[in-house]
Amino acid sequence: EAKKQGRSQHVFFESDMASRVELAYSLENELRQAVSQQQFFLVFQPQVGVQEGVIQGAEVLIRWRHPERGVVPPFEFIPVLESSGLIQEVGKWLIFESCQCIRDWQNQGLWQEDAWLSVNVSPNQFYNPSFVDDVLAALKITGVKPECLELEITEGIVIGDTENTIKKLQKLRSHGIRVAMDDFGTGYSSLSYLKRIPLDVLKIDQSFVRDVTVDKTDKAIVEAILAMSISLDLEVVAEGIETKEHYLFFKGTRCHRYQGYLYSPPVEASFFKEMLKEIVVA
Ligand code: C2E
Ligand code: MG
Ligand code: MG
Ligand code: MG
């Protein structure tokens, strides 16, 4: 009986694997179509000055408008873009499109001189030998100042190839592009690499923010990151500010900017443009 059960489990496992492989394969095909049919679009989540209380810039987040499934969130497809190599084309488009948005909003008089868009960069996109040139080309073609662009990398990128990463980041920063470490504190690496990586901004991961006002450990971690950011001369962004309590906590610290549902979820370009209009008027 046990043998029979073990066997049927085995068969079940194999067919489960097969269907998962099939699923991944069809997802990859669908994503190829999505690229050729331009089904991706950008949404923007305002980044707000903690003390000033106004929008200073925004994080750019990708969405996929699937013909049947509607809007698909990035965690369902970014890994497949990465593993299939499609991220090269999509990543290049993301950066170009972000610069193009800045250009449009500048032309319409909606862009504050020192505002920025912050764009997420995934590992295989970053490791492409032409990455830095592609970014510089996008800025040049659109006529956008490098200071208007921030790139968000992750600890995973650094661990993958530390020396190469340092060189590329130095090059980007030498042009005036800012670099932010996203999801800070969630990676494997510890604090030692921070000294060597050329950075401008640390983004405190939302997993530490969620319970910062009730959980002593999370509070200690957040305070340690903030204290460290002083000696490393880094700007700090708090992610996932959902409540007034979250906001008030960070208002009492040296944290520079925040983003989160309390101020606004990520919104489509037309909506973000309306938000920009309000600042210009204000
Ligand atoms: P991330 O870069 O850390 O982005 C922050 C995520 O937190 C976004 O999810 C955002 O919608 C969500 N968020 C914002 N405010 C709140 C809040 O108050 N509470 C909570 N619980 N969540 C909040 P999203 O857009 O689903 O993106 C998830 C992840 O997918 C991103 O994490 C990033 O790693 C990746 N991603 C998104 N867009 C891109 C992209 O254009 N390129 C690359 N390479 N990765 C992207
Ligand atoms: Mg990010
Ligand atoms: Mg993040
Ligand atoms: Mg995150």
Image (cartoon, rainbow, N blue to C red):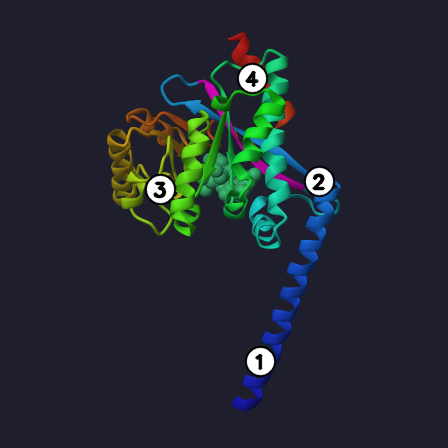
Q: Secondary structure at mark 2?
A: loop
Disc 2: which residue: 39
In the rendered structure, find residue 71 and report the number of the disc placed on it.
none
In the rendered structure, find residue 10 and report the number of the disc placed on it.
1
Q: Position of residue 282 (x, y in %)?
A: 51, 8
Alpha carbon distance from label 4 to label 3: 29 Å
Disc 3: which residue: 208
* Mark 4 or mark 2: whose residue is earlier in sequence: 2
* Mark 2 or mark 3: whose residue is earlier in sequence: 2
Q: Position of residue 146 (x, y in %)?
A: 50, 24
Alpha carbon distance from label 2 to label 3: 33 Å
Q: Position of residue 51 (x, y in %)?
A: 36, 19
Q: Residue at 37% across / 34% down in the picture?
A: 199
Residue mark closest to the camera, 2 vs 1: 2
- Magenta stretch encompasses residue 62: yes
Give whichever of 96, 216 is nearer the camera. 96
Q: Is residue 227 above or below residue 2?
A: above
* Mark 2 or mark 1: whose residue is earlier in sequence: 1
Alpha carbon distance from label 4 to label 2: 25 Å
Classify mark 1: residues with Cα within 10 Å, few (<14), some (14-19) or many (20+): few
Q: Secondary structure at mark 4?
A: helix
* Mark 4 or mark 3: whose residue is earlier in sequence: 3
Q: Secondary structure at mark 1?
A: helix
Q: Secondary structure at mark 3?
A: helix
